[in-house]
Image (spheres, rainbow, N blue to C red):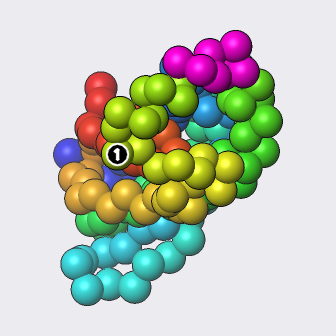
Amino acid sequence: MSSETAAPTSVSTHILDTSVGRPAEGVALTLSVRSGSDGAWTAHGASTTDADGRCKDLPSLPDGTTHVRLDFAVEEYFVSNKHRVSHQHCGHRKAHQQAEEQQDAPRVRDSGAFFPEVAITFAVQPGEHYHVPLLLNPFGYSVYRGS
């Protein structure tokens, strides 16, 4: 199949804030690409997650791309949503305090995010689609290749 008729290589992503069980809206991200494991990174696109936590407008990857990096700017998301999350937990303050005393949980949760940014790097093959969901909370994250 020639490169003119080959399906484009594409990337999509979404973010679920597992600390509240909802999509993470308003997270800025950049998409960078490179050719070869020692190639220089080139910015290729940017987006912000929508109300469903998705980025639907990332561009197709250029021919020759072998690696992709998604950089998620999560600190601003957690700082801007801090008051909403803390307000939701006011009614459960006593139970929450007891649970924290029984765990090795961080005592101060008002500092934003432990990880101010999340960078995910992965290898790609021509003509495939890569969906890369990010499961996020203030003190950790998980990522996987979705469908």
Specify the principal SS of the magenta part: helix
The quadrant of the picture occupied by the N terminus is top left
Q: Quadrant of residue 72?
A: bottom right
Q: Position of residue 14 (x, y in %)?
A: 50, 33
**Is residue 78 shown to the viewer in this render?**
yes
Of residues 58 and 106, the one drawn nearer to the viewer in this rendering: 106
Of residues 44 and 76, the one drawn nearer to the viewer in this rendering: 76
Give neighbour class at mark 1: few <14, some 14-19, many 20+ (Cα, 10 Å): few
Task: List the residue tagged with mark 1.
Answer: 104
Of residues 96 and 70, the one drawn nearer to the viewer in this rendering: 96
Report the residue at 27% width, 39% height from top.
144
- Taking the magenta stretch, the answer to whether it contains residue 3 is no
Q: Is residue 123 above or below residue 87?
A: below
Give the residue type at disc 1. Asp
Q: In screen coordinates, is 46 left or right of 101?
A: right
The quadrant of the picture occupied by the C terminus is top left
Q: How many marks?
A: 1
Report the residue at 41% width, 44% height from top.
105
Q: Position of residue 138 (x, y in %)?
A: 52, 45
Of residues 25 and 33, the one drawn nearer to the viewer in this rendering: 25
Q: Position of residue 30 (x, y in %)?
A: 58, 60
Q: Is residue 1 above or below residue 95?
A: below
Q: Is residue 61 above or below residue 67?
A: above
Q: Judging from the image, what secondary structure is the residue with disc 1 in?
A: loop
Report the residue at 43% width, 36% height from top.
101
Q: Which residues are magenta?
A: 89-95
Q: Position of residue 95 (x, y in %)?
A: 53, 18
**Is residue 72 shown to the viewer in this render?**
no
Report the residue at 42% width, 68% height from top.
33
